[in-house]
């Protein structure tokens, strides 16, 4: 199946229609927003089977994994917003300093306006629809641009959105990077982009022309530290899970291991056992092991295997775009596997002797989207204090994304802005300061020529 580019004329028409719809003030009403969130919730239930089938066709993603890592996350986000939108959107009074009396001060939350949401292919449902929840909740309109690399999923999403919402409110635009470029030539009130740092720079450059705010959810090389005191069996199982989830095609997957040299052999053995526990004796036959998204990705990830000594795995099959979970040792730090984001089931291991080496290693590189530490909690907190990352887990991987009460986002090269829960609502909103000053009293001190300035100065 191949996705056809949406015609530029149609794109321009959708953008104009959404601007007019937002100007009608319909989306400002909380009742309307709640109704639309409920529509999305119902659509997710109605379209669950077609979405799961499409995810299997495009990525070999099982129904269980599709629901756990995609549909349930969006459904939970929708319900969270339905339950809390009234409080989030409520005008909030803030303290007013003595120097401003008798005025009073409030913060009013208003929608930014017309949103553009561009998503990647690795979690094509979650990473497109989760930001949409924030757009609906805040009162924005939205154009959704899914990835052409997962054509079956993108088509089902288009059908679902078209059946659920008016195009002048929420619409799906399909196509390749030519369509992305056409979209980015237009002015939006916010752009929400999930993808690579390289493409994130292009989005930010385009947004700068109109001073459009952006949320950039990018990636990078997320380190996973296995210290001397780590519980190796648990570490191996949780790392094997985090790295084989979606076949490593996860922006927060462990990208490389920094492992204490005394624990390498034990870890390799336990990692192999963990993979078999998760996927059976022949992972190729597992219904829960995803394939690489396309031939280009397969060849790129397979190429990383030659950058080190294979100590576990290493098998592949181009006909299925299958790559076995692979551990590499003796990896040169200048090799592609250590300088490029892997985005696949290959995991290079870098030995160390003390934590200072680890801290220096991480700080010398771009700030990652995630950092994982296995070992003593006290030592973990020190490593986290002395490094920077979008998010972190201690003695676990991936799970920080599962808590909607915590921010999810990058820092530096791994992105900017946060979302999930209330932060998704705020990502698509503007906080507006409003000062109300009565007319029954008009103190003269602030006016020129500033009489009694000595007294006024004491109040400032």
Image (cartoon, rainbow, N blue to C red):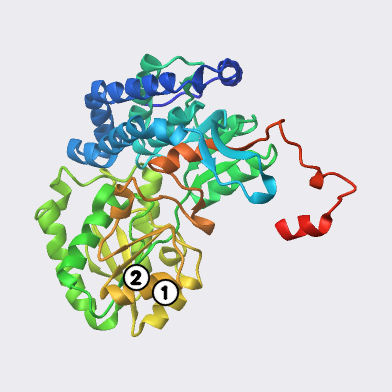
Q: Which residue is mark 1?
A: 332
Asked if residue 446 lies left or right of residue 89, the reply is right
**Quadrant assignment, res 81:** top left
Q: Quadrant of the C terminus?
A: bottom right
Q: Say above or below: 315 vs 216.
A: below
State the residue at coordinates (32%, 46%). 292
Name the residue nearer the viewer: 279 or 407.
407
Callout 2: helix, strand or loop? loop
> Can the viewer see residue 62?
yes
Query: Residue 66: x and y, percent?
Result: 24, 37
State the residue at coordinates (57%, 38%). 106
Query: Residue 107: x and y, percent?
Result: 56, 38
Asked if residue 11 lies left or right of residue 52, the reply is right
Residue extending farthest to the right is: 449
Q: Which residue is mark 2?
A: 308
Query: Residue 361: x and y, percent?
Result: 45, 75
**Quadrant assignment, res 391:** bottom left
Q: Say above or below: 56 vs 265.
A: above
Q: Are marks 1 and 2 in contact (CB under 8 Å)?
A: yes
Estimate how packed mark 2 is, as few (under 14), some (14 to 19) or many (20 or more) residues with alpha carbons within 10 Å. Answer: some
Name the residue nearer the viewer: 125 or 42.
42
């Amino acid at each position: 199946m191949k996705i056809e580019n949406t015609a530029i004329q149609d794109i321009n028409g959708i953008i104009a229609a959404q601007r007019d719809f937002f100007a009608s003030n319909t989306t400002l009403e909380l009742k309307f927003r709640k109704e639309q969130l409920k529509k999305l919730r119902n659509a997710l239930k109605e379209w669950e089977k077609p979405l799961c089938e499409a995810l299997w066709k495009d990525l070999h993603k099982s129904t269980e994994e599709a629901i756990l890592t995609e549909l349930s996350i969006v459904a939970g986000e929708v319900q969270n917003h339905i339950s809390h939108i009234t409080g989030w959107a409520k005008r909030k009074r803030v303290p007013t300093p003595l120097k401003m009396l008798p005025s009073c001060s409030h913060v009013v939350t208003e929608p930014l306006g017309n949103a553009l949401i561009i998503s990647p292919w690795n979690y094509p449902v979650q990473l497109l629809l989760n930001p949409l929840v924030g757009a609906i909740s805040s009162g924005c309109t939205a154009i959704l641009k899914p990835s052409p690399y997962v054509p079956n999923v993108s088509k089902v999403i288009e059908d679902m959105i078209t059946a659920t919402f008016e195009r002048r409110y929420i619409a799906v635009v399909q196509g390749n990077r030519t369509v992305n470029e056409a979209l980015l030539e237009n002015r939006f009130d916010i752009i929400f982009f999930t993808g690579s740092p390289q493409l994130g720079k292009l989005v930010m450059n385009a947004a700068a022309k109109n001073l459009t705010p952006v949320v950039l959810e990018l990636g990078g090389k997320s380190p996973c530290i296995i210290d001397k005191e780590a519980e190796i069996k648990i570490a191996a199982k949780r790392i094997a899970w985090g790295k084989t989830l979606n076949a490593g095609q996860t922006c927060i997957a462990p990208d490389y291991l920094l492992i204490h040299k005394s624990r390498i052999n034990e870890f390799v053995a336990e990692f192999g056992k963990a993979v078999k526990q998760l996927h059976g004796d022949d992972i190729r036959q597992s219904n829960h092991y995803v394939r690489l998204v396309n031939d280009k990705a397969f060849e790129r990830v397979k190429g990383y295997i030659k950058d080190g000594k294979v100590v576990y795995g290493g098998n592949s099959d181009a006909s299925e775009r299958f790559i076995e979970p692979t551990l590499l040792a003796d990896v040169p730090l200048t090799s592609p596997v250590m300088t490029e984001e892997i985005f696949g089931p290959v995991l290079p291991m870098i030995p160390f002797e003390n934590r200072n080496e680890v801290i220096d290693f991480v700080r010398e590189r771009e700030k990652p989207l995630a950092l994982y530490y296995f070992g003593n909690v006290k030592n973990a907190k020190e490593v986290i204090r002395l490094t920077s990352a979008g998010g972190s887990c201690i003695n676990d991987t991936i799970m920080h994304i599962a808590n909607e009460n915590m921010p999810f986002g990058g820092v530096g090269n791994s992105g900017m802005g946060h979302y999930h829960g209330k932060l998704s609502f705020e990502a698509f909103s503007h906080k507006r300061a409003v000062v109300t000053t009565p007319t029954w009293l008009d103190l003269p001190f602030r006016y020129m020529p500033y009489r009694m300035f000595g007294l006024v100065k004491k109040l400032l």
